[in-house]
Image (tube, grey):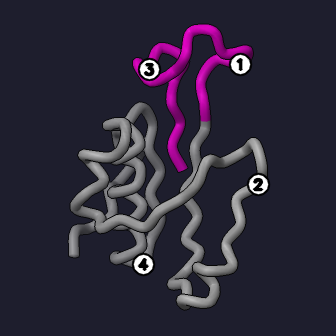
Amino acid sequence: MHWLPPDHPDIDPGMRMPGEVRYILDGGTLTDGEIGAVCTPAGELAGFEFVDSTQVEQRMKPVDAQILLAALRARLSGTTAHLEGGQHVGEAPPPR
């Protein structure tokens, strides 16, 4: 879970509600059949792709890459990650 405060640079100043909470949920490992069955809701998502974790920093906004990598680190250590403004709140999951 990640809280972006209203003054974070990735928050659009025109948002109706200040700040934003973002979640990353671990859906496990998908089979080829499950990947083939994924459908994106019309008008909600333009698409999806799977990339190696080493590519996230080049392909995502910096704060989104931080969130994803914190979630991956938490998964590998068997715990959760809570962030605020891109920084861990409390103890960070240990590296693996």
Mark 1 and mark 4 lie on one chain; the one further toward the N terminus is 1
Does the residue at mark 1 contact the one at mark 2 (Cβ under 8 Å)? no
Looking at marks 3 and 1 on the same chain, the residue that comes earlier in the sequence is marked by 3
- Marks 1 and 4: which is nearer the front? 1
> CA–CA distance between discs 3 and 4?
29 Å
Mark 1 lies on a secondary structure that is loop
10 drawn magenta: yes
The residue sitting at 37% across, 36% down in the picture is 61
Kindly indicate the quadrant of the structure image that contains residue 40: bottom right
Q: Disc 1 marks which residue? A: 17
Indicate which label's residue lies in the foreground, 2 or 3: 2
| Residue at the image position 66 percent from the left and 48 percent from the top | 45
- Seen at 71% across and 66% down, the residue is 39
Q: Which residues are magenta?
A: 1-20
Give me the disc on residue 8. 3
Q: Which residue is mark 4?
A: 78
